[in-house]
Image (spheres, rainbow, N blue to C red):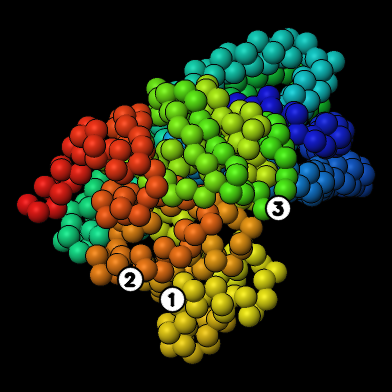
Amino acid sequence: MIDQRVFKFPGVKPAAAIEAVLTLIQAIMIIIQAQYLSVAIVQLWKQQPIGTIVTPLAIFAVAFLARHLLTVLKDWLLYPFVEKTTKTLRKQFMAKLFDLGPSVVAEKGTGNVVTMGLEGIDKIQTYLMMIIGKVLDLSITPWLVLIYIAFIQWKEALFLLAIYPLIILFMIILGLAAQAKADRQYAGYQRLSNHFVDTLRGLPTLKQLGLNETYADNVYQVSEDYRKKTMATLTIAMTSTFALDFFTTLSIAIIAVFLGFGLMDNTIQLLPALVILTLAPDYFAPIRNFANDYHATLNGKNALTAVLDVLQRETPTDRQLLPTREPVWQADDSLALAHVNVSYGDAAPTLRDITFNVHGFQKVGIIGASGSGKSTLINTLGGFLSPADGQINVRGTQVPHLDQQAWQRSFVYIPQAPYLFHASLRDNLAFYAPDASDSAVTAAAAKAGLTDWIATLPDGLATQIGEGARGVSGGQAQRIALARAFLDDSRRVLLFDEPTAHLDIETEVELKQTMMPVFKDHLVFFATHRLHWMNEMDYILVMDHGQIVEQGTPADLQQQNGAYVRLRSEMEGATTR
């Protein structure tokens, strides 16, 4: 139930020690209130004067109040530790995602990662608040009560001790069933999250194709599947709660029968019998509270396991092997990859035996059919993915991967859909150079062909764009990404991943005229399936099923009449049909 890694969190041991002391005091208060409540009842049973029950009732009231105030105090003292821990987990989780790059998102799905980082951390906070206190209560209170009962009547104490493992065994069996159901429920929740995010992303396309209603049914089916898994989990939860209440109530009833026979046989007095009967429910209360909250904490435990599994993933080390200089990439520099294999997680290699060598300010085209590995190669060049084996040499320095701090400061990454932050247009343009002057930002925007568009905006560069603000077309988004490259001249490596894939041909032609000046004095890697870009490249890598099947200058590849020529023929044929 409790993940052992919880005890490795900073500050957990002092917090648990304080909780344990307060739980011990609370258990003593439970015994005191039972003792003096029984004394008051016995005095009334014996028809003693009212004055004889004032003191016992006062002690009972103080113990009762202290018992419940201690519950509030325990939560109040535990909360700072839990809040600090969850904040640290969220910070570490986000930092880990940045270190791991897109591989973890590709493996687990965007919706799943978003769920872990937001709702998952909140569930962990609830889990930590509940589980630490419940486990300590379960570890201290029943045994202190049992010891006190043993001093009064050892037979009843022995019965309570014997029945306790049977209840725990039964709860373990139901708990395992509940865990399996909760695991499936959490998996369904992750699937629902991924489907929801994918639907939102693809809604414009689905609408244009007239598939929005069809896909809505798909989302409904996923939601319905999650509902059924949730109801199955709740069924187990209610069954186990009923079973536990039945067994504990039955045990208390058996104790009451034994005590009744004892009173009839004069083997026990009324006061000790009443104390035992009053304490019996409190003996079972911790395990009942634990069981009631068990199902409420399963999602928190699953979320904690998922987050900790991500945090324990290995991240690239030796990130400072490449010497830093300005600019990082110059005309006489070279980049060489030899027999590099890349995979996502433990899956089979996505890229196999990647070998090429580029120099200075070359324009390198990467071409291939969909799924050939173009984006994976770009991600590897960006340092987002680390090779499983092979050699990488940058400027004469051997490095195990390209997640080098110096290399990261050398390139601009322009994907199919550049991300625009919810901020001003100026802040988005100055993404790589936040300290750039207004004149530099304006000049970069002009080079990217944004001047006329900016002039139509009521607030100019101060206009808010991005999620929840002013919409931006695909062509404008690509121009903003190009302006970022213009603005930071120290970044001499450009990584393009299908930057015009979602643009119409007219917009692409206009954008091409803007992009070509950016290529000057830069090392460019341009992954695309648009053939006309290959005419602008100095060197071409032809990819197929994760391998470079052909490479060379456009003229050399044309003369070889191999994979490049066949690919061009296939693509031109698909275009003309």
Q: Earlier in the sequence, mark 2 or mark 3?
A: 3
Q: Is residue 442 visible?
A: yes
Q: CA distance from mark 1 to mark 2?
A: 9 Å
Kind of residue sitting beneath label 1:
Gly
Callouts 1 and 2 close, C-beta under 8 Å: yes
What residue does disc 2 label? Answer: 510
Q: Quadrant of residue 484?
A: bottom right
Q: Is residue 166 above or below residue 84?
A: above
The x and y percentages for residue 2 are 64, 27
Q: Is residue 364 above or below residue 307?
A: below
What residue does disc 1 label? Answer: 449
> 90 left or right of 292?
right
Which residue sits at x=79%, y=48%? 80
| Residue nearer the viewer, 25 or 531 | 531
Q: CA distance from mark 1 to mark 3?
A: 28 Å
Kind of residue sitting beneath label 2:
Glu
Q: Quadrant of residue 149?
A: top right
Question: Label for residue 466?
Answer: none
